[in-house]
Amino acid sequence: MTNKGKPGGASKPPSTSGALVKATDQSQLEFELDFFAGILERYPDYVDVLRIHGNNLTLKGRIVEGLHIDKRLVHLRPNDPLAHYNLACSFALLKRTDLALKTLRRAIELGYRDFRYMREDSDLESIRSDPRFRKLLREFEDVT
């Protein structure tokens, strides 16, 4: 088997495991999606892995699957502002404006305070021009 991308077609050593060969034939993101999905099959409530996996699904454009992960995280961590923020982002990416704004409000109420990032986060692009978005940020920025 030749090693793609290497000049001269260098061969891989015969001792290379099948898993390693598979990892080099796919992108890092695809590898992580497979890897973390495997962990979640065994440990479905592993919060740290759920966070990474949800983010990776969204990066891959698998927004609905990412939404399901974000909903699981909010269920597992109902008072976690970051879990609510990520759920709001998923709703916004799916153009579910009312749910995105409602969930973003909850994230802010729970303590999410990175207002500068909220104004720049491309995930929130679909709600940024909504007057309720601007009002929400003004309401809480004045408090902090």
Image (tube, rainbow, N blue to C red):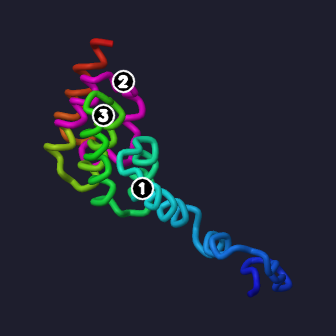
Find the distance from the CA under tag 1 to the CA under tag 3: 19 Å
Mark sitting on residue 86: none
- Residue pictured at 51% horizontal, 66% vertical: 30
Which is more N-terminal, label 3 or label 1? 1
Neighbour class for label 1 at 10 Å: few (<14), some, many (≥20)? few
Badge 3 amino acid: Arg
Q: Where's the C terminus, which quadrant? A: top left
The residue that mark 1 highlights is 42
Q: Is residue 46 above or below residue 23?
A: above
- Residue pictured at 82% horizontal, 83% vertical: 11
- Circles 1 and 2: CB distance less than 8 Å? no
Badge 1 amino acid: Arg
Mark sitting on residue 113: 2
In the image, residue 104 lies in the stretch drawn in magenta: yes
Q: Secondary structure at mark 1?
A: helix
The span picked out in magenta is 102-127
Which is more N-terminal, label 2 or label 1? 1
Find the distance from the CA under tag 1 to the CA under tag 2: 34 Å
| Viewer-closest of 5 and 137 | 5
x and y percentages locating residue 8 in the rendered image: 86, 85
Of badges 1 and 2, nearer the viewer stands 1
Mark sitting on residue 77: 3
